[in-house]
Amino acid sequence: MTQWAATDLERPWTVNEERRWHFHKRAQMVRDARERWAYLWKLSKVPKLDEIDVEVEPILKNWRSAPDVAACAGTVKAAIDALVDIKIIADDSAKYVRSVRFWAPTIGETQGLRLTVREVVRDRQARTNQATETITPTPVRGDLA
């Protein structure tokens, strides 16, 4: 499995914060995040990819005011848009981004957001000639169905 990670040391904004912003502020925040993430992806040397999975891990200094698991979705969208901006993937549609998985925050020495991009391998032919990843669906628990 081939993967690349990048970490932005700015705390990601939450969906709740974004709802309160004026549209000019939101546009500026998204623009700034896309530029930062484009730079981070270039530093991570992510090559052009056909299809990807993305894993999201918020990093907090402590558990006070910890956001919900997917509260950083707006920031993540900007980071994925940056992959398109610098032509790592052709588009951010489901044809190119197979999944986005949000993990609960972890505690670290700094705050920020770590994204990991994994190349999706089809027909057991990775362009990098590395082993393929097999993902099995999680079974549905009877009491939740």
Image (spheres, rainbow, N blue to C red):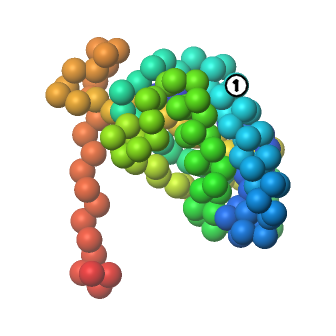
State the image quarter where residue 145 is shown.
bottom left
Hey, which residue is sitting farthest front in the picture?
24
The residue closer to the viewer here, 68 or 131, is 68
* Residue placed most toward the observer, 67 or 64: 67
Q: Residue at x 64, y 63 (%)?
A: 71
In the picture shown, does residue 15 fall above or below 119? below
Which amino acid lies under the numbered mark 1 shown in the image of this protein?
Answer: Tyr
Can residue 128 be seen here? The reply is yes
Residue 53 vertical position relative to residue 21 in the rendered view, above or below: above
Quadrant of the snapshot with the N terminus = top left
Identify the image quadrant of residue 97: top left
Task: Name the residue at 61% across, 40% down.
Answer: 79
Q: Which residue is mark 1?
A: 39
When the figure is inspected, residue 37 is found, relative to residue 141, above or below; the finding is above
Front residue of 53 and 109: 53
Coordinates of residue 48 in the picture (x, y in percent): 45, 20
Q: Nearer the viewer, residue 40 or 55?
A: 40
Give the residue at x 77% y 59%.
Answer: 23
| Disc 1 secondary structure class | helix
Crowding around mark 1 (Cα neighbors within 10 Å: few <14, some 14 to 19, many 20+) is: some
Query: Residue 31 placed where, x, y %?
Result: 73, 41
Residue 53 visible in the picture: no
- Residue at 73% from the left image edge and 63% from the top image edge: 18
Residue 33 placed where, x, y %? Answer: 72, 41
Furthest-bottom residue in this view: 143
Instruction: Give the left or right position of residue 94, taking residue 9 as reference.
Output: left
Q: Which image quarter: residue 123?
A: top left
Instruction: Specify whether 56 is left or right of 11.
Output: left
